[in-house]
Amino acid sequence: MNTERAILAWNHVYLLLGYKYDISLMADDIVQICDDILSMKHGTRLIHWPSNTFAAAWNVAWNSGVVSVEAQWNRVIGCTESILAGKPRISIPREDFLAEWKGPLDVVRAALEMAGYTPGQISGLHRLQSVVARLPRYGHLYCNDEI
């Protein structure tokens, strides 16, 4: 229960995400959206985050320069849904959006590898490794290259 938390900054509202119950459920969708943005110049994707402490729907749209997200906040830890609902949209440069996911995904990748898992044992591990390697840099919240 006492595991590290990731921080998600949304329009100056900070949300804590647990790796055990939030990020673990979100990882496949995060890898998918990052892979899509890395692979396609423009597109859209609707994501329904499944955690009971981070239940939200994100409509993500991107082009070559910007990622925009419109969110519907259903339930988050800290009961800040009403604050978040007042700021449902973000637009961020594509490279910055991708960079902010590199740290949390690298934590997941490293934890799985340190536990001895291989791509043959976990569906999606190879894709996770590939996406982390292709993400341009670490973001502001996870700026250390040695995670």
Image: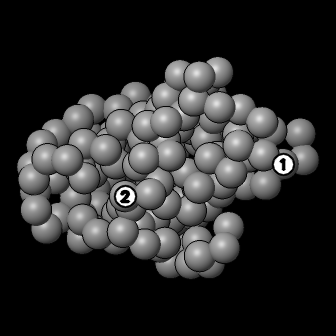
Quadrant where the N terminus sits is top right
Q: Amino acid at mark 1?
A: Thr
Q: Which mark is residue 134?
A: 2
User: Residue 113 at x, y = what percent?
Assistant: 71, 43
Question: Along the polypeptide, which appears first: circle 2 or circle 1?
Answer: 1
Residue 64 spot, x, y in % from top left: 10, 62
116, 106: nearer the viewer:
116
Q: In the rendered image, which quarter is residue 58 located in?
A: top left
Q: What percent of the width, then of the height, locates residue 26?
A: 53, 35
Residue found 57% across the figure and 29% down from its top = 119
Return the residue nearer the eye: 59 or 97: 97
Along the line of sight, the residue nearer the viewer: 33 or 90: 33
Question: Residue placed at 20% from the left, 47% from the top?
Answer: 39
Please tell me which residue lies in front, 74 or 137. 137
Indicate the amino acid at tag 2: Arg
Q: How many marks?
A: 2
CA gap, disc 2 and disc 1: 27 Å
Q: Can you give x and y, in whole percent of width and height, for residue 110 in the image?
A: 68, 51
Q: Which mark is residue 138?
A: none
Density class for disc 1 (Cα within 10 Å; few <14, some 14-19, many ≥20) is few
Q: Which corner quadrant holds the C terminus? A: bottom right
Rendered image: mark on residue 3: 1
